[in-house]
Amino acid sequence: MNRKNIIIIGAAGRDFHNFNTFYRNNEEYRVVAFTATQIPDIDGRKYPSELAGELYPEGISIYSEDQLPSLIEELEVDECVFAYSDVSYEYVMGIGAIVNAAGANFTLLGPKGTQLKSNKPVISVCAVRTGTGKSQTSRKIIETLLEHDLKVIAVRHPMPYGDLNAQRVQRFATVEDLKKHNCTIEEMEEYEPHVERGNIVYAGVDYADILAAAENDPAGCDVILWDGGNNDFSFFKPDLAVTVLDPHRPGHELKYYPGEVSLRTADVAIINKIDSATAESIQIVENNIKLVSPKSSIIKAESKITVDQPEIIVGKRVLVVEDGPTLTHGEMKIGAGTVAAERLGAKEIIDARPFAVGTITETFNKYQHIQNVLPAMGYGEQQLKDLEETINNADCDAVIIGTPMDLTRIISINKPCTRVHYDLDEVGSPNLSDILKGFIQEHKLVK
């Protein structure tokens, strides 16, 4: 058989899932390479043979995306598959132009070819951009289901940045599990809020194996909750699809891939952060939901912010540390920490850039829209050290930790600091409680 040569263009997540579900055992295709971007130090590795399967006894090499044109020529590539998320349509088609100019076809795989079917009811939580409030929405859904005595297992979008074999299936039930699996800050930002509440979370590389493990978890499982990443659509076929939108970025819901896919397939569309957005921006988002997803139920919600020690902020010069991906490829200039500083009357939010060192300086140079906030970057040991040194260099009275995990657990901060927490608080009706009651009845989950 004359197999087509394929490159999967990714960022250590959707790319591996597309390979596992569509290409791994498909003898019509030969995946000759992955390319990687967005995440530091991903390229230069291999997708191991143990995960790649019998058709790939030597595994599959991972290259930097900037090598794409030469790889297409050298590896005689027929088709390139774009497989990462939260990028503008202009960016996607820019990559498509590079691929076509090198002679290859440019492809996007959809849900039909990549979604896995669970034997448990599935609720998916996705978004139109990263940083909209998926995690707080997931937590609210889980808490509501727990009130009905249902056992919920959360499965998180992949972030496998280490040993891929070791990360094939990961289960997180305690904070200690985060250390056991050598989690990055980005991973801890997502897993820690779950496990602190006693929720079990799965993640990893092979989502067929992960799904089977979640369905058969020793703690029991009545419902699978897909906790999405960036603005990607679910890896599992949902029975109830929830998509979260951000009025701080009005119009982005129709301009970023694959966020519009998540919106168009939503059963429930949540406009979050209405307490800190303008009425005009909220209306733009609501109009766009009605335009492309007219059958979805629209919920409006506030992102309710609480601060552990508000007195640390009042009248002080503060450094604000925010969720990393929200600021970087999410393109936000502020987060919950900034909102807390403004509401509590901080004297000044200092500019972190003059105090940055090493890889943090590189982050500021790459994402020049980031100004008076510090992204919580920590993909490796060196970056974590650079983050700690940057914070400790800062000329300020206090530090606001706006990222969802407890930074003080993994780095030493030499000045007073306080954490900001944020939770979903729906306004009016419809609301998640009513919608989930219908879901429970539909799937005969009443106990």
Image (cartoon, rainbow, N blue to C red):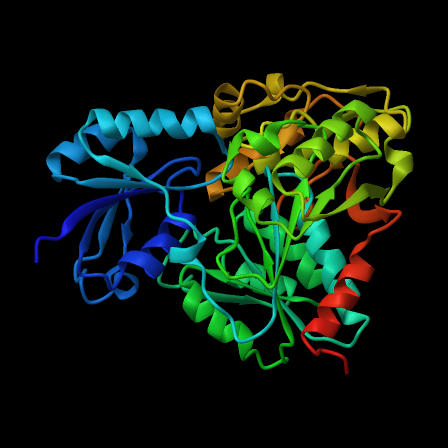
Give the quarter of the figure containing the C terminus: bottom right
* Residue 113 relative to residue 63: left or right: right
* Residue 345 relative to residue 69: left or right: right
Q: Is 96 situated above or below 405?
A: above
Q: Nearer the viewer, residue 120 or 11?
A: 120
* Res 80 seen here: yes
Residue 39's spot in the image, x, y percent?
Answer: 44, 38
Residue 314's spot in the image, x, y percent?
Answer: 90, 29
Q: Nearer the viewer, residue 145 or 286?
A: 286
Residue 145's spot in the image, x, y percent?
Answer: 75, 68
Q: Nearer the viewer, residue 298 or 69?
A: 298
At horizontal 43% and vertical 41% (from top left) the residue drawn is 84
At horizontal 63% and vertical 80% (from top left) the residue drawn is 220
At horizontal 16% and vertical 40% (from top left) the residue drawn is 77
* Residue 285 relative to residue 5: left or right: right
Residue 262's spot in the image, x, y percent?
Answer: 56, 45
